[in-house]
Image (cartoon, rainbow, N blue to C red):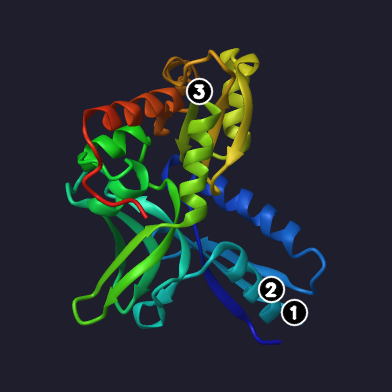
Amino acid sequence: MPIQSVILLEKAYGPNKNAAIKAFKHIILRLLKDLNVKILKLERAEKNWIKVVLNGEDAEAAKNYLAKEFYTTTLINQLKKGDIIKGKLVDVEEYGYGVYVDIGIIDPHPKDALIPLYVLRRQLAKGHIVSTRQIVKKYAFMNNLPLEVKIRDIDESLGTIEAELSESQVKKYKKWIKQEVDRILVCGATRQMIRKAIIRSGHLRDILNIERLGLLEHAVVCKPGTTAQGLIAEIGKYLPKIPMKAFKAKEIKKWLKELDMLKEPTVKVR
């Protein structure tokens, strides 16, 4: 039987990369339980993306299903304007003109997609003149945070890709802000690890639930009145070396209102 392999847009990184591989295998086995297929290998590929090697009568069907479910790496010349892809933030806070998202372009050369500052302003700051640093801070952007993006433009000759947040990603942020509860964004730990850390810290009563954003990325939803920043210090004791940031919904809502009061948007909101 032919062997099939696919590189999926989920990453195994940091101190818990081996746990991530193990957890991902359980997820995949659950998804493929009705197919005649065997996982021969599950390993890290270039840029920490996870490679799955399959064998069996339904190996090709399983490969296609996983690629649709998790997205997969591709060539820049196969990318099309309007494509929706879920990637991971990289090199956050290193550039003032926008943020980069790793969308799995690894051939012929690794290439990340840029969400320019003017697009971030339009989508996340109601068109007001704010800096990349302000948006990164307010929306708790961090390396490896999953973002679903829509491809705006591709220049193969220059090897550049421009993107914007997808409609569903923007709606997610609007929903989070409307809910007016804090969230702790965690990048680098499995859901089980996060839950254990919350229990050990004695703060389970302060948490509504844990939302899965990716394999190692989650949003811990705080109960009303509970501040994310305070919990980070407590939970962080049991998740050493794991990056966490506070998404403060009420603070973002207040910030957006203050921007409206200062002056009219300079970037037309579509």
Q: Local crowd at mark 1 within 10 Å, few (<14), some, or many (≥20)?
A: some
Q: Helix, strand, or loop for circle 2? A: helix
Q: Identify which amino acid the numbered label 1 is placed on.
A: Asp
Q: Tell me if label 1 and label 2 are in contact, CB under 8 Å.
A: yes
Q: Identify which amino acid the numbered label 2 is placed on.
A: Ala
Residue 238: image tag: 3
Quarter of the image containing the C terminus?
A: bottom left
Distance in Å between CA atoms under marks 3 and 1: 41 Å
Quarter of the image containing the N terminus?
A: bottom right
Where is residue 252 shown, x and y percent of the image? 38, 29
Q: Is residue 239 left or right of residue 58?
A: left
Question: Dot 2 corresponds to which residue?
Answer: 62
Residue at image x 41%, y 53%? 88
Q: How many marks?
A: 3
Q: Local crowd at mark 2 within 10 Å, few (<14), some, or many (≥20)?
A: many
Residue 58: image tag: 1
147 or 117: nearer the eye? 117
| Farthest-out residue, bottom | 1
Q: Helix, strand, or loop for circle 3? A: loop
Looking at the image, tell me whether mark 3 or mark 2 is earlier in sequence order. Answer: 2
Q: Is residue 107 left or right of residue 70?
A: left
Q: Identify which amino acid the numbered label 3 is placed on.
A: Tyr
Residue at image x 52%, y 44%? 172
Say which quarter of the image contains residue 247: top left
Residue at image x 36%, y 40%? 141
Q: Tell me if label 3 and label 1 are in contact, CB under 8 Å.
A: no
Where is residue 8 shown, x and y percent of the image? 52, 65
Q: Does 2 sit above or below residue 258?
A: below
Q: Does 124 sit above or below residue 181?
A: below
Distance in Å between CA atoms under marks 1 and 2: 6 Å
Q: Which mark is in front, 3 or 2? A: 2
